[in-house]
């Protein structure tokens, strides 16, 4: 695939969306393709994890609807840390409704996601109206959207024709707002992609220890994601924040994944 041989730095100019550019710039500057998912119970615990891992990551992924203590001040602190430690904020909201509803969910409610999240994602199941509804809110703010083309979990229905139609939906929407995909493979196949097009492929389900969990999650190593499958960003949750041994252990584990991911990337572009 043409994209997998290019350094991140050379892909910046292939994008117009400010969030896509920012992600690639940070990856190049900090030498990291690691995103950490902070799926802990409280906003205050999440901030502690972020302070430890922030310097190792290009992105912090949140599920703010998990937090029992979500407040506006969490968002303020998160945005402050994102500037100090140089990372992008990705709210893994997985929107899945009609355009009108998702535009309200994205802009309003308690979380007001569009106000602070650089990046969010959506299922393609409702059709292109979901992109239109979200872009109405997010595009003027310079935000980016990922479509869910594949999932890491066992038995996922997002396969084959669904995955391909998701890619085509993104392609038709244009890249001013849709900047890539959550996927397990390079789903922007060479025969589908047009000249000068570039998408960011981000893969969850990454771990150096366990092969999965009891609820269907499946893990691959950073090497498998980046070299074998051509992903651009690896997303790690429990493998990092769940490590035993206290604060330093979490920090060290994030560095371990950063180094693994970066080594695999360097090997990939040197092929
Ligand atoms: P884990 O602790 O590394 O298993 O967490 C993975 C995170 O990625 C978690 O927040 C999930 O919601 C998220 N995820 C996923 O695991 N698989 C998917 O296909 C998608 C998201 Br989409």
Image (cartoon, rainbow, N blue to C red):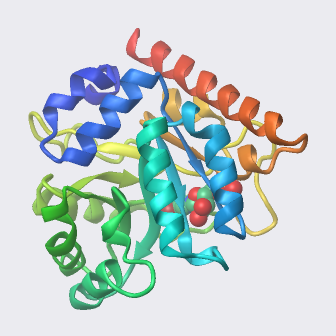
Between 24 and 178, the residue placed more toward the observer is 24
240 left or right of 110?
Answer: right
- The x and y percentages for residue 226 are 50, 31
Is residue 151 visible in the rendered image? The answer is no
- The x and y percentages for residue 99 are 22, 85
159 left or right of 177?
Answer: right
- Residue sitting at x 35%, y 48%: 187
Which quadrant holds residue 27?
top left
Which quadrant holds residue 145?
bottom left
Q: Quadrant of the C terminus?
A: top left
Q: Seen from this angle, which residue lies furthest right?
A: 245
Q: Quadrant of the N terminus?
A: top left
Q: Seen from this angle, which residue lies furthest top?
A: 270
- The x and y percentages for residue 141 are 19, 61
- Residue sitting at x 69%, y 51%: 48
Which quadrant holds residue 6?
top left
Between 114 and 15, the residue placed more toward the observer is 114
Q: Is residue 45 above or below residue 110?
A: above
259 left or right of 142?
Answer: right
- Residue sitting at x 54%, y 76%: 71
253 left or right of 246?
Answer: left
Quarter, ligand 1: bottom right
- Residue sitting at x 50%, y 56%: 78
Q: Is residue 149 above or below residue 195?
A: below
Is residue 270 visible in the rendered image? The answer is yes
- The x and y percentages for residue 207 are 70, 42
Q: Is residue 96 above or below residue 161?
A: below
> Disc count in the image?
0
């Amino acid at each position: 695939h043409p994209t997998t041989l290019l350094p991140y730095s050379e892909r910046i100019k292939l994008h117009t969306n400010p969030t896509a550019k920012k992600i690639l710039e940070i990856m190049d500057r900090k030498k990291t393709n690691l995103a950490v998912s902070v799926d802990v119970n409280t906003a205050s615990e999440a901030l502690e994890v972020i302070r430890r891992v922030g310097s190792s990551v290009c992105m912090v992924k949140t599920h703010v609807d998990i937090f029992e203590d979500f407040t506006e001040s969490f968002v303020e602190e998160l945005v402050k840390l994102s500037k100090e430690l140089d990372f992008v904020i990705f709210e893994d909201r997985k929107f899945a409704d009609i355009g009108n509803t998702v535009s309200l969910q994205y802009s309003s409610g308690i979380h007001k996601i569009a106000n602070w999240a650089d990046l969010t994602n959506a299922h393609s199941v409702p059709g292109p109206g979901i992109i239109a509804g979200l872009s109405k809110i997010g595009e003027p703010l310079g935000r980016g959207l990922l479509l869910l083309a594949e999932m890491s979990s066992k038995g996922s229905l997002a396969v084959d024709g669904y995955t391909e139609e998701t890619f085509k939906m993104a392609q038709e929407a244009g890249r001013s707002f849709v900047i890539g995909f959550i996927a397990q493979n390079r789903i922007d196949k060479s025969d589908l992609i047009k000249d000068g097009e570039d998408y960011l492929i981000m893969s969850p389900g990454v771990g150096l220890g366990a092969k999965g969990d009891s609820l269907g999650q499946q893990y691959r190593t950073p090497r498998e994601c980046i070299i074998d499958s051509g992903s651009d960003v690896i997303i790690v949750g429990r493998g990092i924040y769940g490590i035993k041994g206290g604060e330093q252990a979490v920090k060290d584990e994030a560095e371990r994944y950063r180094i693994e991911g970066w080594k695999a990337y360097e090997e990939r572009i040197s092929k």
